[in-house]
């Protein structure tokens, strides 16, 4: 199946821990994104990478560090987790060479910090 | 500012039309988008409109754009229970990032 996939789907952890969420796309896209969706369903962009290079970095605490080992993967590492980090995190990708920015979303990772 | 506003809830009877409204802020957006999020899933692009168009029709979906008022709407004809979801409008402004609206939860009842 061609898609954007994320692992894990659910992540429950204690405050202060460090965790990673992985994202892979097999669509051949150059650009990948991380979004955070809070409990009220507000969706905000966190990061964007184009061909392994960071191009968008919103005002996100530096406890969040994205890593792109190749253009098909964009992982999100979070240090010293806080209660307020609880949310659903979505990875997305978009194809190159189009002015219309259609983004393809993964199924999301629900992070719960206790 | 980057505030894209939508009403939070809409409830319609099956078979009726639904109209979801959005007010955006950045008039430099080349495209405006409607995304759909079904329960427990990621967002999917439903339709989009180029900024020099007033209207776009795609089967049961009609998008209306009023650039003067920065108002975008999505009309779903003959709404079905499978249309129950959260609908997000989005703009890009003159950047590559999508700015999403607050989302409208559409509930369709029989």
Image (cartoon, rainbow, N blue to C red):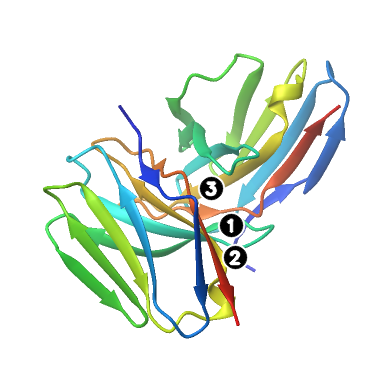
Residue occupying the point 43% across, 84% down: B78
Q: Is residue A27 above or below residue A82?
A: below
Do the residues at discs 3 and 2 belong to one chain? yes
Return the residue nearer the eye: B32 or B108. B108
- Label 2 vs 1, first from the N-terminus: 2
Residue occupying the point 37% across, 48% down: B90
Q: Are marks 2 and 1 in contact (CB under 8 Å)?
A: yes
Q: Which class describes the residues within 10 Å of circle 1: few (<14), some (14-19), or many (20+)?
A: some
Please give the chain letter of the residue carrying mark 1.
Answer: A
User: In terms of secondary structure, where does tag 3 sit?
Assistant: strand
Q: Which class describes the residues within 10 Å of circle 3: few (<14), some (14-19), or many (20+)?
A: many
Distance from disc 3 to disc 2, alpha carbons, whole Å, reads 13 Å
* A56 horizontally vs A1: left or right: left
Q: Is residue A96 above or below residue B47?
A: above
Q: Is residue A100 above or below residue B100?
A: below
Res A19 quadrant in image: top right
Q: Which class describes the residues within 10 Å of circle 2: few (<14), some (14-19), or many (20+)?
A: few
Residue occupying the point 53% across, 42% down: A71
Quarter of the image with the C terminus of chain A is top right
Distance from disc 3 to disc 1, alpha carbons, whole Å, reads 12 Å
Q: Is residue B29 visible?
A: yes
Q: Are marks 3 and 1 in contact (CB under 8 Å)?
A: no
Which residue is under mark 2? A2
Which residue is under mark 1? A26
Res A55 quadrant in image: top left
Please give the chain letter of the residue carrying mark 2.
Answer: A
Residue A109: x and y in percent read 72, 44
- Label 3 vs 2, first from the N-terminus: 2
């Amino acid at each position: 199946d061609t898609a954007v996939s994320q692992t894990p789907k659910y992540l429950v952890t204690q405050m202060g821990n460090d965790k990673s969420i992985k994202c892979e796309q097999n669509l051949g896209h150059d650009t990948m994104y991380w979004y955070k969706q809070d409990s009220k369903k507000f969706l905000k962009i966190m990061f964007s990478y184009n061909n392994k290079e960071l191009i968008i970095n919103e005002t996100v605490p530096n406890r969040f560090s994205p890593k792109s080992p190749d253009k098909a993967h964009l992982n999100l590492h979070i240090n010293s987790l806080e209660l307020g980090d609880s949310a659903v995190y979505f990875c997305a990708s978009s194809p190159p060479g189009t002015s219309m920015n259609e983004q393809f979303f993964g199924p999301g990772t629900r992070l719960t910090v206790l | 500012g980057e505030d894209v506003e939508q009403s939070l809830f809409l409830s319609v009877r099956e078979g009726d039309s639904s109209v979801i409204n959005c007010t955006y802020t950045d008039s430099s957006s080349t495209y405006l988008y409607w995304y759909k999020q079904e329960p427990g899933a990621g967002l999917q692009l439903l339709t989009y409109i180029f900024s020099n168009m007033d209207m776009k029709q795609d089967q049961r979906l009609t998008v209306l754009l009023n650039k003067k008022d920065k108002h975008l709407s999505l009309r779903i004809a003959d709404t079905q229970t499978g249309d129950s979801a959260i609908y997000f409008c989005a703009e890009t402004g003159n950047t590559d990032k999508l700015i999403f609206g607050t989302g409208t939860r559409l509930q369709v009842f029989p």
